[in-house]
Image (spheres, helix red, strand yellow):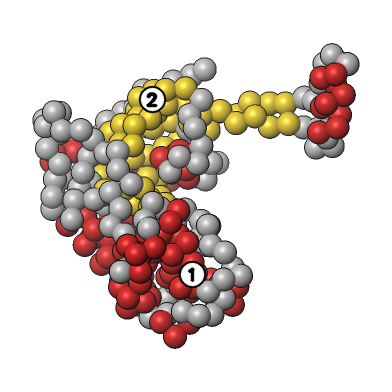
């Protein structure tokens, strides 16, 4: 299994943006620590292989005729994220960006390596994931809060703030199945950020919604960082990453190939992409 050797662009402590992280303070525990993490997926070619056939093969001690192939989505990833960092993850489609977020959200366990995530995590990975479309928006607020570890009383205290941010108070008793995709996005984002997570994971969700909501979402993320939480954003929008992030991680085919100040990492990535397009 191959492992990555990430090329560091420069010391992160030289970032020109506010709240730089002092990497000399090694005694402070990081919110996220990944050491030599790899993740393998297995693809099975026989789509008709049933549970019944599997049971018979096991009973008769027959070798299963299912052919498969392995795919390493992440390979030898080393990553440390400190309190207060705004981390942008960039790369081409299939680079492993979203897979890395799902691993940090504990959706995928690593195949090998060590993953340490300290604090509660709010993943904005798939808008509406975890929602029950048959019940109201108000009930979904309480439901999502329970999934994130908050009791009913704690979430009820946050309902007013969620409605104030989303502007969805008049739809509180409406079943979620009647919400538009933009309303889904606003509600999911508001719930995740109202609970003040230690780690906020965002996968392209800032591209949804109208311009007014986008501005409010960016402002809220900045506010979260002022309260010393960490935000990790996956996006193809380089302007948004430059604006929102202090540090960049460039991924390519499951490897971390660049890590440093966001402007430098983006410039290197765009230069590489332009060169690849010329060759193609």
Circles 2 and 1, Cβ within 8 Å, touching? The answer is no
- Residue under circle 2? 114
Figure check: 72 above or below 149: above
Name the residue rendered at 48%, 29% in the picture.
110
Q: Position of residue 203 (x, y in %)?
A: 44, 53
Figure check: 113 above or below 44: above
In this view, the residue in front, 233 or 10, is: 233
The answer to whether any part of residue 243 appears in the image is: no
Name the residue rendered at 21%, 43% in the picture.
83
Say whether disc 2 or disc 1 marks the residue closer to the N-terminus: 2
* Quadrant of the image occupied by residue 64: top right
Name the residue rendered at 36%, 56% in the picture.
150
Figure check: 87 above or below 140: above
Name the residue rendered at 49%, 32% in the picture.
109
Identify the element where label 2 is drawn.
strand
Q: Which mark is residue 139?
A: 1
The answer to whether any part of residue 73 appears in the image is: yes
* Distance CA(mark 2)–CA(mark 1): 37 Å
Considering every residue shown, the one lying at the far bottom of the view is 170
In-image side of 127 versus 79 (left or right): right
User: How many neighbours does mark 2 have within 10 angstroms: few (below 14), some (14-19), or many (20 or more)?
Assistant: some
Identify the element where label 1 is drawn.
helix
């Amino acid at each position: 299994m191959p492992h990555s050797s990430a090329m560091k662009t420069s010391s992160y402590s030289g970032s020109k943006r506010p709240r730089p992280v002092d990497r000399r303070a090694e005694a402070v525990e990081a919110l996220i620590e990944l050491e030599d993490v790899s993740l393998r997926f297995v693809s099975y070619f026989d789509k008709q292989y049933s549970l019944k056939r599997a049971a018979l093969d096991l009973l008769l001690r027959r070798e299963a005729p299912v052919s498969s192939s392995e795919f390493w989505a992440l390979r030898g990833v080393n990553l440390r994220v400190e309190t207060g960092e705004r981390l942008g993850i960039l790369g081409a489609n299939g680079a492993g960006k979203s897979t890395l977020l799902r691993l940090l959200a504990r959706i995928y366990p690593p195949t090998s390596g060590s993953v340490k995530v300290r604090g509660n995590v709010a993943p904005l990975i798939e808008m509406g994931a975890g929602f029950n479309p048959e019940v109201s928006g108000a009930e979904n607020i309480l439901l999502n809060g329970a999934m994130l570890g908050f009791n009913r009383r704690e979430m009820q205290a946050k309902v007013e703030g969620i409605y104030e941010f989303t502007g969805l108070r008049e739809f509180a008793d409406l079943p979620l199945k009647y919400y538009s995709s933009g309303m889904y996005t606003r509600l999911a984002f508001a719930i995740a950020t109202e609970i003040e997570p230690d780690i906020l994971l965002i996968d392209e969700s800032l591209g949804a919604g109208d311009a007014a909501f986008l501005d409010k979402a960016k402002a809220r993320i900045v506010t979260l960082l002022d309260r010393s939480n960490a935000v990790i954003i996956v996006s193809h929008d380089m302007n948004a990453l430059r604006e929102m992030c202090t540090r960049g991680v460039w991924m390519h085919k499951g490897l971390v190939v660049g890590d440093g100040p966001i402007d430098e990492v983006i410039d290197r990535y765009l230069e590489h992409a332009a060169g690849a397009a010329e060759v193609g």
